[in-house]
Image (cartoon, rainbow, N blue to C red):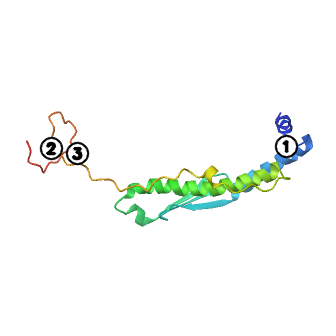
Amino acid sequence: MTVDILKALGIGTGHDVAARQRRLADLDAELAGQRFRGASRDSSVTATVNGRGEIVDIVVRDDALRSPHPELVGPAVVEAVNRARTEAGQHARAAVSAVLHPEAPPPEPAAAAFAPAAAPEPAPPAAPARRGRAADDEDFGDYDFLALEE
């Protein structure tokens, strides 16, 4: 069935398709052994993925965890993983393209195809607003106990 689909797509003849399938299986094993690294803009997090895009390692600098804004570590992890996966994706796409279309020129790097949309730099969280107790206020999370309002 797969051979028929690949032939219909114009990828090759029966024998050629079977050889390409074997080469793709070998390529998958090769990609699993390769490593690609990405870092966040502030270098607080480094992520390593394999050629398949699977996360292998994430390293967070100690000073990022001890900073006044440790909540920024999460977005930095996402950014580092996305950058590593972008590198892995570009490499994998070029390798698969070379197997499926050996006569075609190598594809141009297309970082935009794998890179996430650029997000603005997160601002530090604002201090909670201080207010007095409202008549229907059941939540004391933002209540200013130092205020002498009645």
Q: Are marks 2 and 1 in contact (CB under 8 Å)?
A: no
Q: Position of residue 1 (x, y in %)?
A: 83, 33
| Quarter that holds the C terminus | top left
Q: Is 52 on the left or on the right of 69, as rendered?
A: right
For disc 1, the marked residue is: 11
Q: CA distance from mark 2 to mark 1?
A: 71 Å
- Pointer 2 or 3: first along the chain: 2
Q: Is 88 on the left or on the right of 45, as rendered?
A: right
Q: Which residue sits at x=20%, y=42%?
A: 140
Q: Which mark is residue 132?
A: 2
Q: Position of residue 90 (x, y in %)?
A: 68, 55
Q: Nearer the viewer, residue 29 or 104?
A: 104
Q: Which mark is residue 142?
A: 3
How busy is the neighbourhood of tag 2: few (under 14 within 10 Å), some, or many (20 plus)?
some
How busy is the neighbourhood of tag 1: few (under 14 within 10 Å), some, or many (20 plus)?
some
| Dot 3: element | loop
Q: Quadrant of residue 111?
A: bottom right
- Pointer 2 or 1: first along the chain: 1
Q: Position of residue 5 (x, y in %)?
A: 82, 35
Q: Which residue sits at x=42%, y=63%?
A: 64
Q: CA distance from mark 2 to mark 3?
A: 9 Å
Q: Is residue 8 above or below residue 82?
A: above
